[in-house]
Image: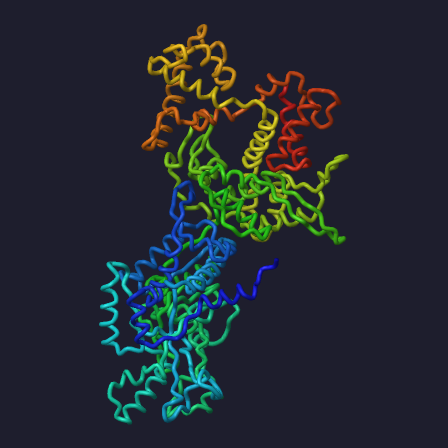
Amino acid sequence: MRRNYIREADRALDGAYEEPMSLAEYVDAAFESPSIASHASKYLLDAIESMGTRTVIEEGEERERYRFFDDPHNDGEHAILGNTAVLNGFVDDLRTIAAERGKGEKIIWFDGPTATGKSELKRCLINGLREYSKTPAGRRYTVEWNVANASDTRGLSYGDEGIDDEDDWYESPVQVHPFAVFPPAVRRRLLADLNDTLDGHIPVATNVGLDPFCREAYSYLEEQYRRDGKSDLFSAITDPKHLRVKNYVVDVGRGIGVLHSEDDGTPKERLVGSWMPGMLRELDSRGRKNPQAFSYDGVLSQGNCLLTIVEDATQHSDLLQKLLNVPDEHHVKLDKGIGMDIDTQLVIISNPDLDVELDKFADRNGRDPLKALKRRLDRHEFRYLTNLSLETELIRRELTNETPVWEAEAYEELRERIRAPLRLDVRDGHGTVRDRELAPHALEAAALYSVVTRLDAEDVPPGLNLVDKAILFDRGYLQEGDERRDVDEFDFSHDGDGTHGVPVTYTRDIIADLLHGDRDRHHPELPVELVIMPDDVLDAMVEELADAPVFSRAEATEYEGRLASVKSYVFEQQETDVLDALLAEKGVEEETVAEYVEHVYAWAGDEQLESEHGPVDPDPLLMKLFETEHLGRFGPGAYVGNEPTEPVKEFRREKVITALNRYAWESRDEEFSVSNVDFSEIPVIKEVLETYDWNDVSRLFEDLDPRQWNDPPANTETAAVKEKTIAHMTTRGYSEASAELTSRKVMREVGYKWD
């Protein structure tokens, strides 16, 4: 049965709408839920904090990330991947501004190269604020006026008079805050009493007056009732028949102002709006310009009471100086005689070319006319992603319609997503739709190479390379055998990381071109020509560097030189996949692992083990066989008979016992006992057990010949092993075609050194 989309749409709209209320009812509601009265910076902060945080690892460091920037209400479509430290700095600034502890005069500036997520930030802010305003805690309110039942209504409208009561209501064109209706002294007392209920939270600081349109209505009603000798003048002006408070859903034009790069007009028109000559002639101006004849379509007017974004600020650099006093004075002018209070959080977005514009008078030193502007700008620099998992996710998003943000309890989950293949239906020039496969590790290769081009090579420690640095940044540690090195053992400056390199748009376009062309390879049964291998992607990325206008010659040469280490790493991953498939039946039973660890633990403590026949000594032969046969760690020469030599003893004490004690401590709870430990999950045991090499293969398959792998003779061990290997690889994300190509490549390399 089909879903009732019309009914769902009705519910969505109904959920965001409230019946208008009186001013008194709004005040009561604000005391019940103070967040609905928040000023601009506090409301933006509340919206961001409302969605909570999650823990991520970026540049090897564990950070708390606000889920707001994952665009959760929009299923992650405009999530900002990475740059968590930058976004956290932005939130810290908002907290300072909202609490009026400083930075109130600042204009928040997001700067950075193209394709670093700045445009996604704009969309994410719009989406998040829109959806937050639909929640009870995030409701946003303004006022609307009706003077039709006063003695003279001429002049209060946007056009022709309506024919029924609802047409006589006119909303504030700049979504003015309802508290603005109160006289300043009363408003200050109201805010003080409201903030007394907040228990130390950031106070509400809404202290702006009515906009000119609303002030015209207020003044007109005040004049009428004053002439009539009305007592309780404020009550008469704000009577529900004249004034009501209504909620609105935040969106572009209603609480969010966005100035696009292509917008034009005079500075005044772009900032606040323009006069409409026809309306000026039609409306009674009473000897002056009537503010109801103003368009209020400028970016500050649209963003009043919440957020103003200047996109591509370099195109509007002439406006930046005009904005200098807006953040701290909260005031702009429609013309010489009419001004308007503004409560908005200013954000500007630019590419690095704004730096050039701002520094064009820098050689004048103290006489630089842009010095005041530069002092007002609070810069937050977006950079290219330097996390392998994030870049893989981003490339995948660029090629597909997948939008959910990757979250994982453990890095192993991310690892599977990084290595995963991608299959896409691609229509060729003849209109035929074909299934194209990006083989396992192809997206990983593209992402790793992209990240490696972005990393600063100056701070790489001896013995490591840029790939090692990339892995450190992504998971926080390096693991080689049973040796683990955490990122905090290294001193990375991060000064140059992410400031340059291959943008994701370049990588996306390279892969898109590969998807529309067949590879020059053939197989009698498998569509290998439709498979894009990791090397195909890497080779294409390097070949296009010299011709891509986005890179200088020096950059192209530098990036080309970083390819070899990436290819080596990717081959290691492919080799591991093939080895895992070859030795899929080699696994060790958990009982065998547990038995070994228990005997080692007893050996180290000079203790006995309980058995069905009573206490027994740890078995030296059992431990020796496990270490030589299963772990492959030592040969027979490391023992005197069955007794271990010093290297074996050190291994048992330092790698097994220490790891067990650490794991037991980290995994403990009230009911913990050593018997509950899954010994195969101890990092050192797990790593050693899962690390196979070609000696294991040659020992188990004596008649295997890698040089026959491409076309093994029938009824040979090579043919039988290959069949099982391909079958196992298809359970790990490979198609038969990509498994064939990957195993061929690995076996070709192994064949050179097999003998």
Quadrant the N terminus occupies: bottom right
Describe the colour scheme in one phrase.
rainbow
Judge by depth and name the residue closer to the eye, 238 or 569. Answer: 238
Quarter occupied by the C terminus: top right
The answer to which image quadrant residue 736 occupies is top right
Q: Quadrant of residue 459 in the image?
A: top left
Q: Is residue 433 above or below residue 371?
A: above
Left or right of residue 473: residue 504: right
The answer to which of 469 and 475 lies nearer the viewer is 475
The percent position of residue 289, horizontal first and vertical second, equals 40, 87
Residue 158 image point, x, y percent: 46, 84
Relative vertical location of residue 295 with respect to residue 608 in this rendering, above or below: below
Q: Horizontal and vertical percent for residue 387?
A: 47, 43
Residue 118 location in percent, x, y?
Answer: 47, 57
Q: Name above or below for residue 281 compared with residue 583.
A: below
**Residue under the image location 45 percent in, 62 percent down:** 131
Foreground of the two, 143 or 352: 143
Asked if residue 337 can be seen in this view, the reply is no
The image shows residue 612, relative to residue 491, as above or below, that is above
